Amino acid sequence: MVSSKIHTIGYTVIALIAFAANSILCRLALKDNTIDASSFTAIRLLSAFIMFIILFGLMSKSVINVNKKTNHWKAGLVLFINTVTFSFAYISLDTGTGALILFGTVQITIIIISIFMGKKLNISEWLGLIISFSGLAYLVYPTLTTPNFSSFILMVLAGIAWGIYTLMGRSSTNPMRDTALNFKFTVPLVLCLILITFPMMNISFYGAVLAISSGAFASALGYTIWYKALGGLSETEAAVVQLSVPVIAAIGGVLFISESINTRLIISCIFVLGGIFIVLISRWRLSLKFTSQL
């Protein structure tokens, strides 16, 4: 059990770093107009699927066949919505701000769906959630640093889609194959996106490299590892741990994009991380209590 928990923690940390990398790579690519949002999305998704073709080819396995009873097309649709709205939102959002809005919405989405599914939260978990939400609310409170309305809405939609995608992944029995098939079903949607936005496409070599890095590594491999981590996380844990991504992304934004961390973002992150800590401690105590009773 201890070994399994260590593996879950390891997978979770790696996945969270990959999520932050996606925020940094996307913002880095769109900040200086090295590539347009639709091209970044298309290259990212296609390179992710190509990465799986390469990996499965090396293992002499097929990623093409799919059981007709599976719902990979639904996961693919949600994944596509997340990726498109994510890219267009980051045209004007800072890395840390965008990540905090995204994963704050992810947390809200997962918790609401879990409640409707009959999952009850204890007092400590509610306290942690309220504190985390307070951090998000403080960030978007009307000031000069508040993101514009359209970008905020797009990132909220991206968060809702990712929350649904995360919950879908909790039932995965083969994370690599399931993630590969999810990306496979985004391909027809990507082709439609290319046809619609082709006249407006603007791609530089540097922008393409960033998009490929985001797709082949941070997305294809990062999302596979996240699906592996979900096997050892509860819905609440899966929701709140992702709120650490804005902190990682904000630090990455400072290191790689020369963005500044303002006071509002720092205070927001403190509240968010404090809420995460309370929720995780609450879950661990319940787990230890249940184990001792056995």
Image (spheres, rainbow, N blue to C red):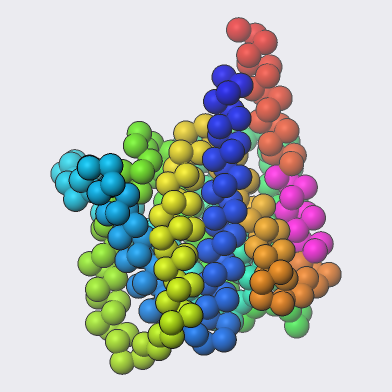
- 196 versus 74 height, above or below: below
103 lies left or right of 259: left
* Left or right: residue 108 compared with residue 55: right
Residue furthest to the top: 294
Q: Can residue 138 be seen? A: no
Residue found 61% across the figure and 45% down from its top:
13
Task: Look at 40% across and 88% down and name the residue there.
Answer: 202
Is residue 6 among what the camera can see? yes
Magenta residues, start to end: 266-276
The number of numbered discs placed on residues in the rendered structure image is: 0
68 relative to 238 in the view: left or right = left
Above or below: residue 270 compared with residue 250: above
Q: Residue at x 81, y 62 (%)?
A: 267
Task: Please tell me which residue lies in front, 145 or 58.
Answer: 58
Q: Which image quarter holds the C terminus?
A: top right
Between 93 and 220, the one lying in front of the other is 220
Q: Residue at 61% of width from left, 21% of height from top? A: 2
Q: Which x, y percent locates residue 72?
A: 27, 49
Q: Position of residue 198 (x, y in %)?
A: 30, 87
